[in-house]
């Protein structure tokens, strides 16, 4: 007669299935979380004062095209913030004040400098999907 301890042992094929399937099950929700991206920052004039009512757009980008996700307006101090879920298949998130379709920008400003996480860059404005990134835009006339 077998002891109760011997009967409680799982067959080795069962352990193998758990080892192979568990990572797939546990990562189902992680992919969704890792595609959530937040961008925030401030739109200012070169002198440092905030510019209100400037649209900042969030666009998902892949080799074969792009997909508009969100547009937010800056507040009275020039601050903005937005969070998006970037669809699968899109590798980067582009955040910028579009020069067209942005009446406040088009009527007054010629261009802008970009600061990503406090550092000036010329590589505007694609970011890695997931996480939180600060984009500050300094507009010039």
Image: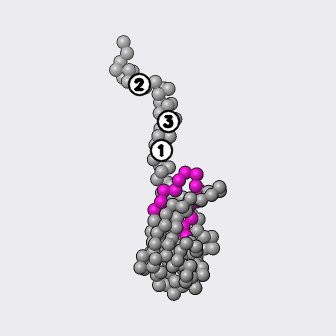
Magenta segment range? 83-96
Query: Which quadrant would the N terminus be assigned to in this image?
Result: top left
Q: Is residue 61 above or below residue 112?
A: above
Position in image of residue 133 (x %, y %): 50, 66
Query: Which quadrant would the C terminus be assigned to in this image?
Result: bottom right
Q: Which residue is mark 1?
A: 28
Q: Residue at x 53, y 74 (%)?
A: 102
Q: Is residue 119 visible?
A: no
Position in image of residue 22 (x %, y %): 47, 38
Q: Which residue is mark 2?
A: 9
Q: Residue furthest left?
A: 4
Label 1: element kind:
helix
Position in image of residue 76 (x %, y %): 41, 79
Q: Residue at x 58, y 68 (%)?
A: 125
Check residue 94 for magenta coloring: yes
| Mark 2 touches mark 1? (CB < 8 Å) | no
Quarter where residue 110 is shown: bottom right
Dot 3 or dot 1: first in sequence order is 3
**Mark 2 and mark 1: Cα distance apart in space:** 29 Å
Q: Residue at x 47, y 28 (%)?
A: 14
- Give the colour scheme shown: one colour
Q: Is residue 30 visible?
A: yes
């Amino acid at each position: 007669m077998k002891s109760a301890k011997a009967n409680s042992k799982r067959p080795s094929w069962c352990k193998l299935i758990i080892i192979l399937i568990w990572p797939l099950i546990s990562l189902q929700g992680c992919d969704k979380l890792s595609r959530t991206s937040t961008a925030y920052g401030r739109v200012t004039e070169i002198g440092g004062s905030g510019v209100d009512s400037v649209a900042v757009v969030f666009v998902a980008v892949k080799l074969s095209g792009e997909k508009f996700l969100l547009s937010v307006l800056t507040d009275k101090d020039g601050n903005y913030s937005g969070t998006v879920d970037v669809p699968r298949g899109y590798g980067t998130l582009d955040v910028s004040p579009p020069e067209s379709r942005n009446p406040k920008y088009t009527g007054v400003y010629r261009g802008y400098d970009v600061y990503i996480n406090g550092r000036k860059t010329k590589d505007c404005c694609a970011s890695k999907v997931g996480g939180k990134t600060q984009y500050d835009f300094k507009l010039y006339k």
